[in-house]
Amino acid sequence: MANRTRRWSIVAGCIEQIFGAESRALTGAEIGVWRAQFTSAILSIVPRLARLYAIDPYRNYAPTQYRCRRAGGWSQEDWDQLYTEVRRNLRRWGSRVVLLRTTSKRAAASVPSGLDFVFIDGNHAYDFVRQDIEMWEAKVRLGGLVCGHDYGSGYHRGVKRAVDEYVTKHNRMLQLDSRDGVWWWRKP
């Protein structure tokens, strides 16, 4: 497992490739925080990431609104406990991280535009992924990075379908890294 390339390393590489020549502080958003592995890793790897909006409702969805197979039988109490744990673990990052316990749609209405990147790894059902891409690409500045996780996974077919449809409809140049199912493009 130690040699496995993780999504945060791939995204950090994309960030460096796109913004490496710039010296300014960066701002991003993460849709779907879960246990905050990506959150902590990307803040550690990209020190000039001054603000990361970490968005997750930490609640159950209706059975037809898939969220995560790992949490399929979770009670709301389980979600509340996870949120408390994540909030406690993210304190060390201070003002660099803003943990928003809300839906992606509600957060999109309050997070400012002009983000340098967005990482989409929330609800993997097709309708949710499609909506997340539409809402959050609009928040990313021109030339910024739109990326996400679980492309091509047999279990997460909704991710691949939503990404492929969006790329085709909006003429985006999709790039993939199959080592951890990461997908991305630069916003034209």
Image (cartoon, grey):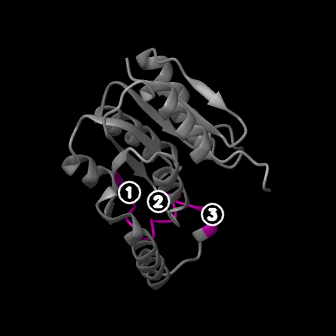
Identify the amino acid type marked 3: Arg
The residue that appears at 57% across and 34% down in the rendered structure is 13
Q: Is residue 33 magenta?
A: no
- On the image, the x and y values in percent for residue 53 come to 33, 53
Q: Give the CA distance from mark 1 to mark 3.
A: 21 Å
To which residue does mark 1 refer? 54
**In front: 44, or 104?**
44
To which residue does mark 2 refer? 33
**In front: 41, or 130?**
41
Instruction: Give the overall secondary structure of the magenta segment.
Output: loop
Helix, strand, or loop for circle 3? helix
**Mark 1–mark 3 CB contact (< 8 Å):** no
The residue that appears at 57% across and 42% down in the rendered structure is 158
Name the residue at the front extreme.
23
The residue that appears at 45% across and 85% down in the rendered structure is 77
- On the image, the x and y values in percent for residue 89 come to 46, 73
Identify the amino acid type marked 2: Val
Identify the amino acid type marked 1: Ala
Quadrant containing the N terminus is bottom right
Residue 69's mark? Answer: 3
Q: Is residue 12 above or below residue 123?
A: above
Marks 1, 3: nearer the viewer: 1
Based on the displayed image, in which of its 4 quarters is residue 149 positioned? top right
> Does label 1 or label 2 sit earlier along the sequence?
2
Helix, strand, or loop for circle 2? loop
Report the span colored magenta: 52-70
